[in-house]
Image (cartoon, rainbow, N blue to C red):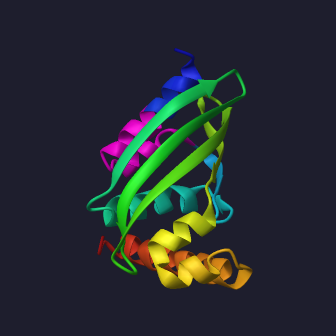
Amino acid sequence: MHPHAEVITRFYTAFQHRDAAGMAACYHPQVHFSDPVFRSLRGLEATLMWEMLCWRGKDLTIQFNNVQTNDLAGTAEWEAWYTFSATGRHVHNRIRAEFMFEEGTIIRHIDEFSFWRWARQALGPIGWLLGWSGPVRSRVQAQARAALARFEGASASGAV
């Protein structure tokens, strides 16, 4: 197995066990992460986001496959099943991940998925009708940023 495939495998195996520290160990300190909800997180923000998702994801189930890598980059496909805490609705999200590596760690991680498909599941009728729209996407992104900021504050104070 290519060393970068091992990093991706360790990352998702840690995620399966909701082991945020194990996930963070796969990231370069200057990592850049982005997906349709959490836009452009860097360094500690990215690792805190995974910690928050692991902490919140009481019923979270993760599967990953199709890991492909070379000396510079890699891809993987993964799926997540969980209850979206804001609405209590069940979500099954299919994600395609792209990675770049530096010093044997992930320096860039971009997850792509259908925001509209996610919104239909997570938000219900509003997501079905308006999940494709910029205002709904912007609102979800702002709420995600606010949740991450609250989690960071709670984590720093030892409340998490």
In the rendered view, would you say 31 is above or below 149? Answer: above
Answer whether residue 19 is magenta in the image: yes
Q: Is residue 24 left or right of residue 155?
A: right
In the rendered view, would you say 133 is above or below 60? Answer: below
Task: Give the residues in magenta.
Answer: 10-27
Which residue is at 55% across, 78% downward?
Answer: 127
Residue 3 in picture, x, y percent from top left? 55, 20
Residue 96, located in which quarter of the rendered image?
top right
Residue 70 in picture, x, y percent from top left? 68, 21
Which residue is at 54% across, 85% downward?
Answer: 126
Residue 68 or residue 114, whichever sits in front: 114
Quarter of the image that includes the C terminus: bottom left
Query: Is residue 145 at all visible to an observer of this figure?
Result: yes
Residue 21 in picture, x, y percent from top left? 39, 47
Answer whether residue 125 is magenta in the image: no
Which residue is at 26% across, 62% downward?
Answer: 58
Residue 64 in picture, x, y percent from top left? 45, 37
Q: Residue furthest top?
A: 1
Which residue is at 40% across, 80% downward?
Answer: 86
Residue 101, located in which quarter of the rendered image?
top right
Principal secondary structure, stretch drawn in magenta: helix
Task: Count the marks.
Answer: 0
Query: Is residue 38 at all visible to an observer of this figure?
Result: no
